[in-house]
Amino acid sequence: MIDKLSLIGGALIGGFVVFLGFGVVNDLWLLPRAEEQGRALERAELDAATTKAIGELTNEADKARVARRLCRELGRVYLNASGGCVERAAE
């Protein structure tokens, strides 16, 4: 009788330890990676939509204005001469 109770108790405790182990692995390794991948996909979709919207503008001045604003929002520097967006110099 005691052997069966010990076996059942050990199985319950072991199952609980495995459950906690998987929870820790999920919280520390799997979820942060999944969240970062989701953010990267969302960022890529937004960048594609922004690029498409800029391309649909008919006025070149509007295109340049939107590109300049987008460049500033990304923390970069817009070069008026070339119309390019470059990384900000380290200070």
Image (cartoon, helix red, strand yellow):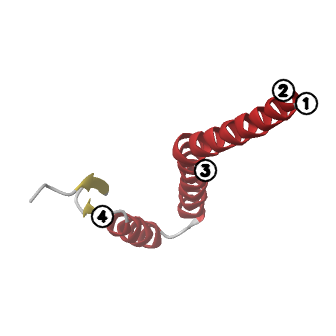
Identify residue for label 1.
1
- Is 33 rendered above or below residue 86? above
Q: Nearer the viewer, mark 4 or mark 3?
A: 3
Identify residue for label 2.
3
Bin the neighbour count of mark 1 within 10 Å (Cα to Cα): few under 14, some 14-19, many 20 and up. few
User: Tag 2's secondary structure?
Assistant: helix
Image label count: 4
Identify residue for label 4.
75
Identify residue for label 3.
38
Tell me what residue is drawn at x 85 percent, y 35 percent.
Answer: 5
Q: Quadrant of residue 72?
A: bottom left
Amino acid residing under circle 1: Met
x and y percentages locating residue 60 in the rendered image: 45, 66
The disc label shown at residue 74, or none: none
Which residue appears farthest toward the left when viewing the image? 91
Pick the residue in front: 41 or 49: 41
Mark 2 to mark 1 CA distance (whole Å): 5 Å
Mark 2 to mark 4 CA distance (whole Å): 67 Å
Mark 1 to mark 4 CA distance (whole Å): 71 Å
Q: Nearer the viewer, mark 1 or mark 3?
A: 1
Q: In the displayed structure, does residue 61 sit left or right of residue 45?
A: left
- Is 11 rendered above or below residue 40? above
